[in-house]
Amino acid sequence: MTSFRPQDSPAAPEPVRPPAHVGESLSADEFKTLFRGHPGGVAIITADGPDGPVALTATSVSSISADPPLLVFSLSSLSSATAAIVAASTIVVHLLDAEDLELARLASTSGADRFADAALWTRLVTGEPVYHGARAWVRCAVVNRMSAGDSTVVVAHALQSSIQRDIEPGTHGDALVYHNRTWHRLGEHSRIV
């Protein structure tokens, strides 16, 4: 089995730039327009920072390996929580469904105190902040960080999980997705095949 260790210098990942011979690229606005039509599942990422717990929403979370269990996500440098999450050695990724919409809104609201309501969250015995009632969460060790333009890509190794609302294989569930700058619920009504 492969062994993973966090990078020695989490605060300064090497930037990734396209090779010079690639030519011109899309503008930021063109790229945003392109992906506005591509829906993403909604997650909240939490960590304990030097000034207390931090959280943000992400639509970039994806599984990349089952053995070992790895996931990946990206963090915008514009988020106030990014620096603390990038520096953390462990994090919690909450995978949301439509019942978690208020949590998703809270974690995506600029300037909001995402941990003001003590009834919404607690700490795991290992210290990471975790929201109560989310469909599922997974505690992870950060194993790699890479600077990518104005974002940081993070690879994390799943250590512990909890599923509050499971879905049976082949059923529609009640997924929360973000599409064209709005929240959507996937369900039987959205099934096309």
Image (cartoon, helix red, strand yellow):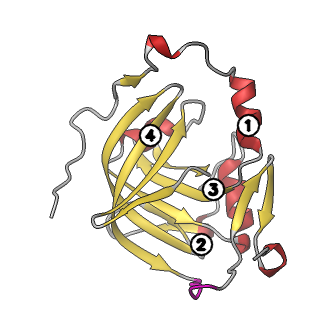
- Quarter of the picture containing the C terminus is bottom right
Q: What element carries label 2?
A: loop
Query: Which residue is at the front of the view, 150 or 53?
Result: 150
**Would residue 166 be counted in the magenta stretch?**
yes
Of the image marks 2 and 1, the number of the one nearer the N terminus: 1
Q: Residue at x 72, y 74 (%)?
A: 99
Q: Residue 44, image x and y in percent?
A: 57, 57
Whole-angstrom CA distance, mark 4 to mark 2, is 24 Å
Q: Quadrant of residue 106?
A: bottom right
Whole-angstrom CA distance, mark 4 to mark 1, is 20 Å
Whole-angstrom CA distance, mark 3 to mark 4, is 28 Å
Of the image marks 4 and 2, the number of the one nearer the N terminus: 2
Q: Residue 126, image x and y in percent?
A: 31, 65
Q: What residue type is labelled 3?
A: Ala
- Residue for badge 1: 34
The answer to whether the residue labelled 4 contacts the one labelled 1, judged by CB atoms less than 8 Å apart, is no
Q: In which quarter of the image is residue 166?
A: bottom right
Please name the predominant secondary structure of the magenta segment in the image: loop
Q: What stretch is highlighted in magenta?
A: 165-170
Determine which of the numbered discs, if any, sits on residue 153 in the image. Answer: 4
The answer to whether the residue labelled 2 contacts the one labelled 3, judged by CB atoms less than 8 Å apart, is no
Query: Which residue is at the front of the view, 122 or 147?
Result: 147
- Residue for badge 3: 116
Q: What element carries label 4?
A: strand
Whole-angstrom CA distance, mark 2 to mark 1, is 30 Å
Whole-angstrom CA distance, mark 1 to mark 3, is 36 Å
**Which dot, 2 or 1, sits closer to the camera?**
1
